[in-house]
Image (spheres, coloured by chain):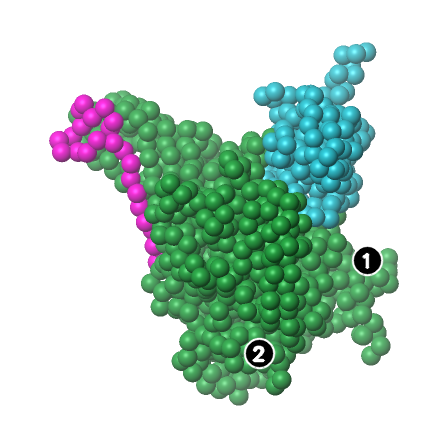
Amino acid sequence: MSDISFVVNGRRVSGAAEDRTLLVHFLRENLGLTGSHVGCDTSQCGACVVHVDGKAVKSCTMLAAQASGSTIVTIEGLANGADLHPVQAAFKEHHGLQCGFCTPGMIMTATDMINRHPEGLDEATVRAELEGNICRCTGYHNIVKAILAASKTMSKVSKGKAKQAA
Amino acid sequence: MAIEGVGARVARKEDKRFITGAGRYVDDMVVPGMKHAAFVRSPHAHAQIKKIDVKKAQAMPGVIGVLTGKELKADGIGNLICGWMIHSKDGSPMKMGAWSPLAFDKVRYVGDAVVIVVAETKGQARDAAEAVEITYKELKAVVDASKAMDKGAPQIHPEAENNLIFDWDIGNADDTAAAFKKAAHVVKMDIINNRLVPNAMEPRAALGHYDKAEDHYTCWTTSQNPHVARLVMSAFYNVAPENKLRVIAPDVGGGFGSKIYIYPEELVCLWASKKTGVPVKWVADRTESFLTDAHGRDHHTHAEMAFDKDHKILGLKVETQANLGAYMSLFSSATPTYLYATLLSGQYNIPAIHANVKAIYTNTAPVDAYRGAGRPEATFVMERLMETAARQFGVSPAELRRKNFVTSFPHQTPVIMCYDAGDYAASLDAAMKASDYAGFAKRKAAAAKKGLLRGIGMSCYIEACGIAPSAAVGSLGAGVGLWESAEVRVNAVGTIEVLTGSHSHGQGHETTFAQLVNERFGVPIDSVSIVHGDTDKVQMGMGTYGSRSGAVGMSAIVKALDKVEAKAKKIAAHLLEADEGDIIIENGALKVAGTDKNVPWFQMALAAYTAHNLPGGMEPGLKETAFYDPSNFTFPAGCYICEVEVDPETGTTEIIQFVAADDFGNIINPMIVEGQVHGGIAQGIGQALLEGAHYDDSGQLLTASYMDYTMPRAGDLPSFKVSTSNTPCPGNPLGIKGCGEAGAIGSPPAVINAITDAIGSNDLGMPASPSTVWAAIRAVTKH
C-alpha cells in the first residue's frame, strides 16, 4: 500500500491505495471524482485527461502514488463556481459533445492546448494536437470549432487583463 | 423563427452535466456492498472444455464467488437468442446454435465467457480470474465466411450443417434473368465490406443487484433499449419476471448499435448477485470490448448490374455471404436480410432485382447491426456499381445516376420497400454545387503539378429508417413490435415531464423532445424534463436505433400532446366560459381566439389538479399516454461527394473536401442533426480509410486495442460541408425521416470512388490504407 496525498481541485486529500493503483482509479474510486473516464487500456483514448501541476496528463499513465505531492485539476474543478470555463462554454455553444464520455478529457486537453498557444490556434494545429483524444460521436468537426472559439475568447480575456495591468 | 421550438438551433440542455464531469454512466454507479466481477474468457477460437478447476481461484484474497456455466444452467438461466426469424428459400427456419451465457462444453470464439469471478476489488477479481484453470482441447477454427462452408471446414454448431444459418432469397430470379438476357451492358464486381468494431467510447458495463427481501433484481446497464433488455431477460433468459426486474440505462456513452443487444455479462451479473448475495459490477476493458462487442458489416458480395443501350438499368443480381460470427446476436439475422437487401434498389428505377444471402457461422465475435446496419453494405454495392458503370461507359457518374433516379412517388421497388417521398436530383445538385464539381478538372491539373493524384467520387444513398411498422416487421420474422410509447405529465404548476421509451446516448433527446413541447404549448424548454432509460419510470418502449427516436418516438409524443391539448382546451373553455373550439394556445396561454380573454398555461394546469372547477364529469389531473405504430419506414436519402489527393509515392490519401447534401424530412434542431451527420461521416471515412477487424487463421483477433485498430482521429479528417434539402415524410405527423445513420451509410463509397478515380484503378479494398492504395497504384502502373 502507498500513502497518497495531493491537492485536487483546491482541496488537500490523502489516502492509501495499492501500489498498482492508477491515478484515474484513485480519483474515481477513492475520491468519487467520476468525471474522468476510462475508455481504453492502452493510454490512447484520452478520456481520463486531468491537469497535474498545470500540464495535461492522461491519468491512466500515472500511478496514484506518483502523483503524491502534486496539484491536480480534474474536470470537476475546471469551472469557477457556477461560471463555466470558456472551453466548457464553447463545447456547449458549438455542440462539441454528444454522448459526453470523451468530453471531460477533450476539455482538459483543449484547455492545456490553448494555454500553451497564447498566440492563438489554427485548425491544423488543433487537429494535430488532438492526436491523443478519441471521440466516436462528433467526427471532431464541432470539437475543433469549439476549441478555436474558446482560444479566441481566452486570448481576448488575457489581452484585456494585460491592458488592465498596463 | 422559433426561439426554442421546432427548427431552432438550441444548445443542448443535457450538456451541463457532461461538460462539468457530472454525467452518470454505469461505471460511476455505487451501490452499498457492491463488489467487482471479472470474466474468464476463452483464449481459443474453437475448443472443447475438458475441465474447469476453480479451487485455486476461490482461495485467492478477496474472492467472494467463482461461478461456472454448469451452475448457471442448473439454475435454469436460458440461452441467448436471436429475436428475428429468417426462413431459407427452401422454407426451413434459420439454424440457430445454442449460446450459453457462460460456455460449459465448448467455446466458439476468442473472448467467449466461461467463468465469472466476484471479489472485493476489481484487481482481486482479475487476479483470481488468472488463477482459474481450464483445460481445453483445441479444435480447428475458421474465421472467413467464404471458407466456412468448404468441405472439411470445422463444424461450429451441431444445429447448423456446414455452418450455414440460412440461405435466403429476395426479389424475382426469373424476371432478373430475363432482364440480363436483354442487356446491352453488364457491370460485374466482387465487393468486400470490411468487418468493423463499433467502439462506443464508453465500454460496456453492468451492475446487477439482487434484493433478497423483495426477491427483486435491478440491473444498471449500458443499453440503447432497457425495456427490450428487461423483456428478453424475463421472457427468454428466465432471470426474473418483468415485475421483479428493473433495468436502468443511465447516461450511456455512445452505442452505434453495439448496445442494442443483450449480452451474457448483464444477465450473468444479475444471476451472480443472487448467488453471492452482493451487488456485482462488471466493466469491460477496451480489449474485452474489441473481443466481445458485436462487430459490424463483414460481407462478401458478387454483384452484377444490367443496362440497356441507353444506360438505363434493367436488372440487378446480388449474392452475399454474411459472416455472423460464432453465435447469433439479438438482431443479427435481420441485418444482412431485411435491412440490407431491401435497399438494393438504391435511388434508382430497377425493374428486376434478385438477391441471395447466405448467413454463416465462423469462430469470430458475433456480428450484428452497427450504425447503418445493412444499409451501408447495400449502398456500397450500389454506388460502387454505378460509379464503375459510368467509368465503363465513359459517361458522367452524375448523369448516369440522374438518368436512373426514381422521380415519382410513391415508388414500389422489387424488394419490398415503397419509397414515399424524395427529390434525389435536388441533393445531387446541391452536393455538386457545394463541392464545385465543375471546377474539379482545374484542381486535378493543379495537384498533378505537385505530383499528387486528385480524385472525386460521389455516392447517392437511400436508407430505411423509422423502424418500423409492427405488423410489417412481424410478418417478416421480428419477435417484437417496433412502435414507441410516450407519456406526457403536466404538473400542477404547469411544468412538464415527458416519458419516452426511446433512449438517448448522445442524440440530444432531452433538448429536441423539449423543443417539440415548447412548440405546442409555449412552455420554456427548461420547464420540460425528458425521462427515459428506466423501466420503473417508463412503462414500455423499444429504445433507440435505426434513427427511430424522431420518426417513431417523437410521433408518440405528438399523439400524447394531442390528448393533453384536447383536455387543456376543455378546461380552459370551461374557465373562460367559451366554446372549446374557439380556444387557441399562444405565448404560454390558452386564449379565446379573437378576444383578449385568456388563462395562462400554469393556471389551467393548477385548475386540473385543484379540480375545484372542472367541466362536469371530467377526471382531475393532466397526464396522457400514447403508443405510436408507424405506417411505413421513412426514407432519408442524399448525395455525398468526396475529393481526395493521393500521394503516389506513399499511397497516403488526404481528404481535401467532403460534402454531404441530405434529405431528412422536417428537422427539429438543425445543430443536432448536423452533429449526427458529422459523426456518421467520420465513421464512414473510418471504414473506408482506417478501420478493419482482422483475425488470424487460428481465430486470434489481431486488432484488439487502439494500438492495432485505427480509430479516426481529428488529424485524419477534414471539416465537413453539410446541408439539407428536405422533402417532408408523409408517413408521420412530424414529417421526420431520421438522420442518425446517413453519414455512415453514404460516405464509404464516396471515399472509395474518389480514390479509385484518383489512382485510375477500380480494384481497391477497404480500408484503403496507404499500403493498400500504394499496391493498387503499382498494380496499374505495371500493366
Q: CA distance from mark 1 to mark 2?
A: 53 Å
Residue range of the region highlighted in magenta in the rendering:
B608-634
Image colour assigned to chain A = cyan
| Vertical comparison of B236 with A64: above or below | below
Residue B642, labelled with which disc? none
From the image, tell me which residue sits under label 2. B155
Query: Does residue B593 appear left or right of residue B518 in this picture?
Result: left
Which quadrant of the rendered structure holds the N terminus of chain A?
Answer: top right
Question: B380 or B98, which is in the foreground?
Answer: B98
Q: Chain letter of disc 1?
A: B
Image colour assigned to chain B = green
The verdict on residue B700 being magenta is no
Q: Residue at x 73, y 48 (%)?
A: A42
Q: Mark 1 or mark 2: name the one nearer the start of the chain.
A: 2
Q: Residue at x 39, y 55 (%)?
A: B234
Question: B646 or B33, which is in the foreground?
Answer: B33
Residue B447, labelled with which disc? 1
Q: Position of residue B347 (x, y in %)?
A: 51, 65
Q: Count up the numbered dots.
A: 2
> Is residue B391 visible in this depiction of the protein?
yes
Which residue type does callout 1 highlight?
Answer: Ala
The verdict on residue B621 being magenta is yes
Q: Quadrant of residue B411?
A: bottom left
Secondary structure under the numbered disc 1 in the rendered image:
helix
Q: Position of residue B540 (x, y in %)?
A: 36, 48
How busy is the neighbourhood of tag 1: few (under 14 within 10 Å), some, or many (20 plus)? some
Q: Quadrant of residue B687?
A: bottom right
Which residue type does callout 2 highlight?
Answer: Gln
| Vertical comparison of B475 with B310: above or below | above
